[in-house]
Image: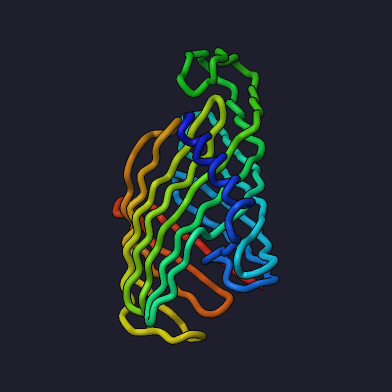
Amino acid sequence: MNSHRIFCVVGLAALFTLTPAFGRPILYGNSTTFMAEYRDGVMKEAQLSYAPSSRWSVGVGHLELNDTGPRHEHEVNFGRLNLLLKRWNLESAQANVFVWGGAGRSSITIAPSPTPEPSEHDHGAPPVPGVAQTFEETAWNSGGQIDFETRRTYFAASSDAHYSSTFLHRTDTLQFGFSPYKHEAGTLATWLVVSASHYAGDIDENTQVALLLRFFRKHVWMELGATTEGKPQGRIMLTF
Protein backbone atom coordinates (compact mmCIF):
# COMPACT_ATOMS: atom_id res chain seq x y z
CA MET A 1 0.00 0.00 0.00
CA ASN A 2 2.77 2.45 0.86
CA SER A 3 4.42 2.00 -2.53
CA HIS A 4 1.21 3.11 -4.27
CA ARG A 5 0.96 6.19 -2.06
CA ILE A 6 4.52 7.09 -2.99
CA PHE A 7 3.72 6.54 -6.70
CA CYS A 8 0.73 8.88 -6.41
CA VAL A 9 2.75 11.60 -4.65
CA VAL A 10 5.53 11.38 -7.23
CA GLY A 11 3.05 11.47 -10.08
CA LEU A 12 1.25 14.51 -8.71
CA ALA A 13 4.53 16.28 -8.04
CA ALA A 14 5.58 15.66 -11.63
CA LEU A 15 2.39 17.33 -12.83
CA PHE A 16 3.59 20.62 -11.35
CA THR A 17 7.36 20.37 -11.82
CA LEU A 18 7.86 18.93 -15.31
CA THR A 19 7.05 20.41 -18.67
CA PRO A 20 3.46 19.30 -19.34
CA ALA A 21 2.88 17.16 -22.43
CA PHE A 22 -0.02 14.75 -22.52
CA GLY A 23 -0.17 11.93 -25.07
CA ARG A 24 -2.96 9.72 -26.26
CA PRO A 25 -5.90 9.33 -25.77
CA ILE A 26 -6.08 13.16 -25.52
CA LEU A 27 -5.30 14.06 -29.12
CA TYR A 28 -6.15 17.73 -29.58
CA GLY A 29 -5.65 20.95 -27.65
CA ASN A 30 -8.74 22.74 -26.34
CA SER A 31 -10.76 19.53 -26.62
CA THR A 32 -13.02 17.39 -24.44
CA THR A 33 -12.82 13.59 -24.38
CA PHE A 34 -15.38 11.09 -23.13
CA MET A 35 -14.30 7.53 -22.43
CA ALA A 36 -16.35 4.50 -21.34
CA GLU A 37 -15.01 1.02 -20.62
CA TYR A 38 -16.62 -2.31 -19.75
CA ARG A 39 -14.95 -5.55 -18.62
CA ASP A 40 -17.41 -8.31 -17.83
CA GLY A 41 -17.18 -9.43 -14.21
CA VAL A 42 -14.42 -6.90 -13.41
CA MET A 43 -15.40 -3.25 -13.81
CA LYS A 44 -17.32 -0.47 -15.53
CA GLU A 45 -15.80 3.00 -15.89
CA ALA A 46 -16.58 6.38 -17.43
CA GLN A 47 -14.31 9.42 -17.65
CA LEU A 48 -14.71 12.95 -18.93
CA SER A 49 -11.58 15.06 -19.39
CA TYR A 50 -10.61 18.43 -20.80
CA ALA A 51 -7.27 19.24 -22.43
CA PRO A 52 -6.34 22.97 -22.35
CA SER A 53 -3.65 21.98 -24.85
CA SER A 54 -2.52 18.75 -26.47
CA ARG A 55 0.08 18.44 -23.70
CA TRP A 56 -1.99 17.70 -20.56
CA SER A 57 -5.51 17.14 -19.34
CA VAL A 58 -7.70 17.18 -16.23
CA GLY A 59 -10.85 15.16 -15.71
CA VAL A 60 -13.35 13.32 -13.54
CA GLY A 61 -14.30 9.66 -13.49
CA HIS A 62 -16.72 7.09 -12.09
CA LEU A 63 -15.62 3.49 -11.49
CA GLU A 64 -17.73 0.48 -10.49
CA LEU A 65 -15.81 -2.62 -9.37
CA ASN A 66 -17.66 -5.91 -9.83
CA ASP A 67 -15.19 -8.48 -8.49
CA THR A 68 -15.06 -7.45 -4.82
CA GLY A 69 -16.95 -10.31 -3.21
CA PRO A 70 -20.59 -11.42 -2.80
CA ARG A 71 -23.21 -8.85 -1.76
CA HIS A 72 -20.77 -5.99 -2.40
CA GLU A 73 -21.20 -2.82 -4.45
CA HIS A 74 -18.03 -0.75 -4.74
CA GLU A 75 -17.96 2.62 -6.50
CA VAL A 76 -15.25 5.28 -6.75
CA ASN A 77 -15.76 8.87 -7.94
CA PHE A 78 -12.50 10.69 -8.59
CA GLY A 79 -10.71 13.60 -10.19
CA ARG A 80 -7.46 13.06 -12.10
CA LEU A 81 -4.58 14.90 -13.77
CA ASN A 82 -2.69 13.35 -16.70
CA LEU A 83 0.80 14.17 -17.90
CA LEU A 84 3.17 12.86 -20.55
CA LEU A 85 6.69 12.62 -19.15
CA LYS A 86 8.43 11.93 -22.46
CA ARG A 87 7.59 11.58 -26.14
CA TRP A 88 9.78 10.38 -28.98
CA ASN A 89 8.70 11.34 -32.51
CA LEU A 90 10.55 9.09 -34.94
CA GLU A 91 10.40 9.02 -38.73
CA SER A 92 7.60 6.45 -38.86
CA ALA A 93 6.97 5.67 -35.19
CA GLN A 94 6.13 7.26 -31.86
CA ALA A 95 6.77 6.35 -28.21
CA ASN A 96 5.28 7.83 -25.04
CA VAL A 97 5.70 7.64 -21.28
CA PHE A 98 2.93 9.19 -19.23
CA VAL A 99 1.58 9.15 -15.67
CA TRP A 100 -1.60 10.15 -13.89
CA GLY A 101 -2.68 10.78 -10.33
CA GLY A 102 -5.75 11.90 -8.46
CA ALA A 103 -8.12 11.46 -5.53
CA GLY A 104 -11.79 10.93 -4.87
CA ARG A 105 -14.39 9.20 -2.74
CA SER A 106 -14.88 5.46 -2.37
CA SER A 107 -18.28 4.01 -1.43
CA ILE A 108 -18.67 0.34 -0.48
CA THR A 109 -22.19 -1.01 0.20
CA ILE A 110 -22.63 -4.48 1.72
CA ALA A 111 -26.09 -5.93 1.07
CA PRO A 112 -28.09 -7.57 3.89
CA SER A 113 -26.98 -11.12 4.69
CA PRO A 114 -29.53 -13.84 5.48
CA THR A 115 -26.85 -15.64 7.49
CA PRO A 116 -24.41 -13.28 9.27
CA GLU A 117 -21.14 -15.03 8.47
CA PRO A 118 -17.97 -12.87 8.66
CA SER A 119 -16.13 -12.22 5.40
CA GLU A 120 -12.73 -10.76 4.56
CA HIS A 121 -14.59 -8.16 2.45
CA ASP A 122 -16.64 -6.80 5.39
CA HIS A 123 -13.99 -4.23 6.38
CA GLY A 124 -13.96 -5.24 10.02
CA ALA A 125 -17.71 -4.99 10.59
CA PRO A 126 -19.81 -8.13 11.13
CA PRO A 127 -22.68 -8.55 8.65
CA VAL A 128 -26.11 -7.73 10.08
CA PRO A 129 -29.18 -9.59 8.72
CA GLY A 130 -31.59 -7.28 6.90
CA VAL A 131 -29.38 -4.18 7.20
CA ALA A 132 -27.24 -2.81 4.37
CA GLN A 133 -23.95 -1.25 5.46
CA THR A 134 -22.13 1.53 3.61
CA PHE A 135 -18.51 2.60 4.09
CA GLU A 136 -17.19 5.84 2.59
CA GLU A 137 -13.62 7.13 2.62
CA THR A 138 -11.05 9.10 0.63
CA ALA A 139 -9.47 7.03 -2.14
CA TRP A 140 -6.42 7.64 -4.31
CA ASN A 141 -5.67 6.81 -7.93
CA SER A 142 -2.30 6.57 -9.64
CA GLY A 143 -0.81 4.89 -12.66
CA GLY A 144 1.40 5.10 -15.67
CA GLN A 145 1.92 3.75 -19.17
CA ILE A 146 4.66 3.33 -21.73
CA ASP A 147 3.80 2.65 -25.37
CA PHE A 148 5.45 2.34 -28.77
CA GLU A 149 3.66 2.44 -32.12
CA THR A 150 4.51 2.22 -35.79
CA ARG A 151 1.98 2.13 -38.61
CA ARG A 152 1.83 -1.68 -38.33
CA THR A 153 2.69 -2.61 -34.72
CA TYR A 154 1.75 -1.42 -31.24
CA PHE A 155 3.03 -2.23 -27.74
CA ALA A 156 1.92 -0.85 -24.38
CA ALA A 157 2.52 -1.65 -20.70
CA SER A 158 0.46 0.05 -18.01
CA SER A 159 -0.48 -0.09 -14.33
CA ASP A 160 -3.49 1.59 -12.71
CA ALA A 161 -4.43 1.47 -9.01
CA HIS A 162 -7.28 2.72 -6.83
CA TYR A 163 -6.61 2.44 -3.10
CA SER A 164 -7.30 3.76 0.39
CA SER A 165 -6.45 2.81 3.96
CA THR A 166 -8.69 -0.27 3.68
CA PHE A 167 -8.62 -1.49 0.07
CA LEU A 168 -6.47 -1.84 -3.04
CA HIS A 169 -7.54 -2.56 -6.61
CA ARG A 170 -4.73 -2.70 -9.17
CA THR A 171 -4.70 -3.63 -12.86
CA ASP A 172 -1.44 -4.33 -14.71
CA THR A 173 -1.79 -4.68 -18.48
CA LEU A 174 0.40 -5.67 -21.43
CA GLN A 175 -0.86 -5.14 -24.97
CA PHE A 176 0.51 -6.05 -28.37
CA GLY A 177 -1.23 -4.94 -31.54
CA PHE A 178 -0.82 -5.61 -35.26
CA SER A 179 -2.40 -3.72 -38.14
CA PRO A 180 -3.07 -5.59 -41.41
CA TYR A 181 -2.25 -2.44 -43.38
CA LYS A 182 -0.31 0.81 -42.97
CA HIS A 183 -2.68 3.60 -42.05
CA GLU A 184 -2.15 7.26 -42.87
CA ALA A 185 -3.07 10.25 -40.72
CA GLY A 186 -6.80 10.95 -40.93
CA THR A 187 -7.68 7.51 -42.32
CA LEU A 188 -9.24 4.53 -40.57
CA ALA A 189 -6.73 2.56 -38.50
CA THR A 190 -7.56 -1.08 -37.72
CA TRP A 191 -5.73 -3.15 -35.13
CA LEU A 192 -5.78 -6.73 -33.91
CA VAL A 193 -4.79 -6.56 -30.23
CA VAL A 194 -3.82 -9.20 -27.67
CA SER A 195 -4.31 -7.78 -24.15
CA ALA A 196 -3.22 -9.52 -20.94
CA SER A 197 -4.40 -8.01 -17.63
CA HIS A 198 -3.51 -9.05 -14.09
CA TYR A 199 -5.92 -7.99 -11.35
CA ALA A 200 -4.66 -7.81 -7.76
CA GLY A 201 -5.63 -6.42 -4.36
CA ASP A 202 -8.93 -6.89 -2.52
CA ILE A 203 -10.44 -8.85 -5.41
CA ASP A 204 -10.17 -12.39 -6.75
CA GLU A 205 -6.58 -12.12 -8.02
CA ASN A 206 -6.36 -13.47 -11.55
CA THR A 207 -4.97 -12.91 -15.05
CA GLN A 208 -7.14 -12.57 -18.15
CA VAL A 209 -6.11 -12.59 -21.80
CA ALA A 210 -8.40 -10.84 -24.30
CA LEU A 211 -8.48 -10.68 -28.10
CA LEU A 212 -9.65 -7.27 -29.31
CA LEU A 213 -10.45 -5.39 -32.50
CA ARG A 214 -9.48 -1.73 -32.34
CA PHE A 215 -10.67 0.99 -34.73
CA PHE A 216 -9.51 4.61 -34.74
CA ARG A 217 -10.23 7.53 -37.04
CA LYS A 218 -9.79 11.19 -36.11
CA HIS A 219 -12.14 11.81 -33.15
CA VAL A 220 -13.46 8.28 -32.57
CA TRP A 221 -11.58 5.37 -30.94
CA MET A 222 -13.31 2.01 -30.32
CA GLU A 223 -12.19 -1.38 -29.03
CA LEU A 224 -14.32 -4.56 -28.88
CA GLY A 225 -13.56 -8.17 -28.03
CA ALA A 226 -13.61 -10.86 -25.37
CA THR A 227 -11.33 -12.80 -23.06
CA THR A 228 -10.28 -16.36 -23.80
CA GLU A 229 -13.00 -17.36 -21.30
CA GLY A 230 -15.64 -15.59 -23.40
CA LYS A 231 -16.12 -12.55 -21.18
CA PRO A 232 -16.83 -9.44 -23.35
CA GLN A 233 -14.78 -6.27 -23.15
CA GLY A 234 -15.36 -2.91 -24.80
CA ARG A 235 -14.07 0.64 -24.80
CA ILE A 236 -14.99 3.81 -26.66
CA MET A 237 -13.48 7.31 -26.70
CA LEU A 238 -15.03 10.35 -28.33
CA THR A 239 -13.18 13.66 -28.68
CA PHE A 240 -15.02 16.95 -29.26
In this view, the residue in front, 184 or 43, is 184
In this view, the residue in front, 170 or 121, is 170
In this view, the residue in front, 64 or 25, is 25
Q: How is the image coloured?
A: rainbow
Q: Quadrant of residue 232?
A: bottom left
Residue occupying image coordinates x 50% and y 61%: 235
The answer to whether residue 65 is seen in the rendering is no
Q: Is residue 160 above or below residue 129?
A: below
How many dots with numbers? 0
Q: Name the quadrant of the C terminus.
A: bottom right
Left/right of residue 104 with respect to residue 201 in the rendered view: right
In this view, the residue in front, 108 or 8, is 8
Q: Position of residue 221 (x, y in %)?
A: 52, 71
Q: Quadrant of residue 213?
A: bottom left
Q: Is residue 152 above or below residue 174?
A: below
Left/right of residue 230 with respect to residue 202 in the rendered view: left
Q: Is residue 142 above or below residue 69?
A: below
Residue occupying image coordinates x 54% and y 31%: 72
Q: Position of residue 95 (x, y in %)?
A: 41, 67
Q: Position of residue 47 (x, y in %)?
A: 62, 55
The answer to whether residue 2 is seen in the rendering is yes
Residue occupying image coordinates x 68% and y 67%: 32
Residue occupying image coordinates x 55% and y 51%: 100
Q: Position of residue 50 (x, y in %)?
A: 68, 62
Q: Is residue 26 above or below residue 93?
A: above
